[in-house]
Amino acid sequence: MSTPEPADRYAELPPPLPTVPLAPLRLRPELEPEGAARAFYEVMDRRRTVRQFSDRPVSRETIEWCVRAAGTAPSGAHKQPWRFVCVSDPALKSRIRAAAEEEEREFYSRRASRQWLEDLAPLGTDADKPFLETAPWLIVVFQLIKTDPPESGLVYYREESVGIAVGILLAAIHHAGLVSLTHTPSPMGFLREVLSRPEHERAFVVIPVGYPAEDCRVPDLRRKPLDQIAVFREAGPGAVRKPGPGSGPA
Ligand SMILES: Cc1cc2nc3c(=O)[nH]c(=O)nc-3n(C[C@H](O)[C@H](O)[C@H](O)COP(=O)(O)O)c2cc1C
């Protein structure tokens, strides 16, 4: 069978969506983009991964707003290939903890390479995961490997899309004054079964959310400065940037 002519293929495609005007957004009208970008950086720079949680409750509404924010993420062909399973049921949390700790014991004692253990050692993590019960909420993020039935269509750039959504979720949690942990029990296939999720969902990450424990401490780590994470390729004399009031820390 010969490949159809491009003209025929395009003729069968659905029409583009109607369009709406883009509503421009200036969150901080008193700040120029440089100042606003710097202010956002300063907020985000205070985000830390927390492993000691308080059991202080967090409302379901708070979690709903954070998940709505995550759901604003861009996604390949707008397939939105994510599901956020929000768990506060103590019985379910203890099942997740028991199953995760079983996998993690195996990971730390056998599966992890020597190099991986060396890289994890400075963070002081081990197979004990009390936060899976202490944190008031666990947001278990699944990626959809197909769209939901009954369509069950393809999804594109699934990992990239869900990764971006998780980034926005972490920012939303931080912005709400709460803390989170990006937890990846290895492997995490058990989550689909414990949470009775369908075949087309695959666990991506577990995010305990809540308030930090009163005596919470975090590793004193350093983030790479700008010159180690960014490369600028600019043309002409305008490329030389003079340090100004908007220039932040390297
Ligand atoms: C994809 C991913 C997986 C992670 N998995 C775990 C994990 O299973 N357990 C854990 O304690 N921390 C985990 N972390 C947290 C990292 O250790 C943490 O982000 C890193 O040490 C930097 O600390 P910060 O988030 O406070 O900047 C993970 C982070 C990411 C992005």
Image: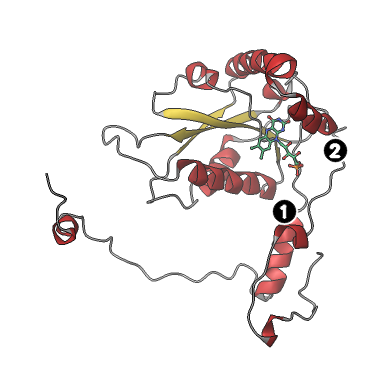
Categorize mark 1 by other alpha carbons within 10 Å: few (<14), some (14-19), many (20+). Answer: some
In-image side of 137 versus 125 (left or right): left
Tell me the quarter of the image containing the N terminus: top left
Residue at 15% in and 54% down:
12
Which label sits in the foreground, 2 or 1?
Answer: 2
How many marks the image carries: the answer is 2
- What residue is pinned by disc 2? 219
Q: Which mark is residue 125?
A: none
In-image side of 166 versus 17 (left or right): right
In-image side of 29 versus 113 (left or right): left
Quick one: SS at disc 1? Answer: helix
Query: Is ligand 1 closer than 8 angstroms to the Cβ of mark 2?
Result: yes
Q: Marks 2 and 1, Cα distance to the nearest angstrom? A: 17 Å
Tell me the quarter of the image containing the C terminus: bottom right
Q: What amino acid type is highlighted by mark number 1?
A: Met
- Contact, mark 2 vs mark 1 (Cβ under 8 Å): no
Q: Position of residue 75 (x, y in %)?
A: 44, 50
Q: Position of residue 35 (x, y in %)?
A: 72, 71
Ligand 1 is located in which of the four quadrants?
top right
Q: Position of residue 68 (x, y in %)?
A: 51, 46
Categorize mark 2 by other alpha carbons within 10 Å: few (<14), some (14-19), many (20+). Answer: few
Quick one: SS at disc 2? Answer: loop
Task: Please indicate, yes or no, whether residue 53 appears anywhere in the rendered image.
Answer: no
Task: Determine which quarter of the picture holds residue 50.
Answer: top right
- What residue is pinned by disc 1? 44
Residue found at the far bottom of this picture? 237
Of labels 2 and 1, earlier in sequence is 1
Task: Determine which quarter of the picture holds residue 138.
Answer: top right
Q: Position of residue 187 (x, y in %)?
A: 59, 22
Task: Determine which quarter of the picture holds residue 108.
Answer: top right
